[in-house]
Amino acid sequence: MSNNSSLKIAVAAFVAVVVVGGVGAVLRIGPLAGPTPPAEVTDPKEMVARSLQATLDATAVHMEGTLDGTLPGALVARPEASVTLDGTTVAGDIRPKDAKTHAHIVSPGLEVDAEAVTVWDGVWFRTGPGEAWQRASLGSASTEAGVDINPLTLVERLRSYLATPGIAPTLDEVACASASGRCHRVTLDAGHDPATILRAMLPADQSADIPEVRTTVTIDTDTLTLRPARLAIDAESDDGTVVVHLELMVSGWDSPDIRIEEPPAGG
């Protein structure tokens, strides 16, 4: 398999992880229900957890956004010193109760037009329109990497993560494109953890090229329902060679028009 094909497959898998887990994949968090009504939650850490819970409770959710910034050429098997991500678009649908997702990324700079569909731990991906779907196991990949993606164990890891000394999200109130028009904006410094997880999920020859990267996560979540309206991820390497901004807008709550089907075998 060529380096370029490996890159496209890695990008498709990465987008699938982002759409499957959203902020949960980044912060290693998961469902957390609580007796307090959403509109009365005041703890920003609880807002993050309940925001993800609101997503998991929905029958369907749509996300779309942009990815901008630069990456070292060597990281994506390109001869250039750096490659721009500007103009990259990302879209995804989630049906949480069916454990199904669909993601699509188009990047002129990376020369990528990739799709990924997940059904439980099964992943189907293709690296271009009209190409045949290939199948893999997200569970197998995560197990080999030593990354636990079992949703039944994520609550405990959420509590452990948020109890880590120095974890101190900031909270602001902002206007937003949500049902109520107002959102809690929670900003959290996730440190090097997300890059460490991504490095573990990639083949050794690719992961070795990833520098130390710090990540900040920002969530705008509706003040009345705690349904997320916007997710932003900013990543910058310590040496300045990686500068990435991912911004996703969340909509389509419980829309019956969002349908995700398992790709046909060999299709």
Image: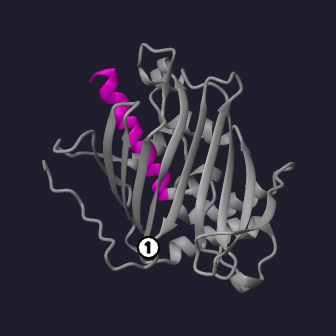
Residue pictured at 72% horizontal, 83% vertical: 39
Q: Amino acid at mark 1?
A: Gly
Estimate how packed mark 1 is, as few (under 14), some (14 to 19) or many (20 or more) residues with alpha carbons within 10 Å.
Answer: some
The secondary structure type at the circle numbered 1 is loop
Q: Residue at x 34, y 31 (%)?
A: 111
Residue at 71% across, 26% down = 238
Q: Which residues are magenta?
A: 1-20
Whether residue 225 is visible here, answered yes or no, is: yes
**Residue 209 image-quadrant placement:** top right
**Residue 31 in sight:** no
Magenta segment, prevailing SS (helix, strand or loop): helix
Could you say where residue 167 lies in the image, as x and y percent from the top left?
A: 82, 52
Is 79 located above or below residue 4 in the figure? above
Q: Is residue 198 left or right of residue 2?
A: right
Which image quarter is the N terminus in?
top left
Tag 1 residue = 252
Does 22 sit left or right of 203 as displayed?
Answer: right
Quarter residue 218 falls in = bottom right
In magenta segment, residue 6: yes
Residue 224 colored in magenta in the image: no
Q: Nearer the viewer, residue 103 or 124?
A: 103
Residue 10: x and y, percent? 40, 36
Q: Can you give x and y, in whole percent of width and height, for residue 264 in the image?
A: 15, 56
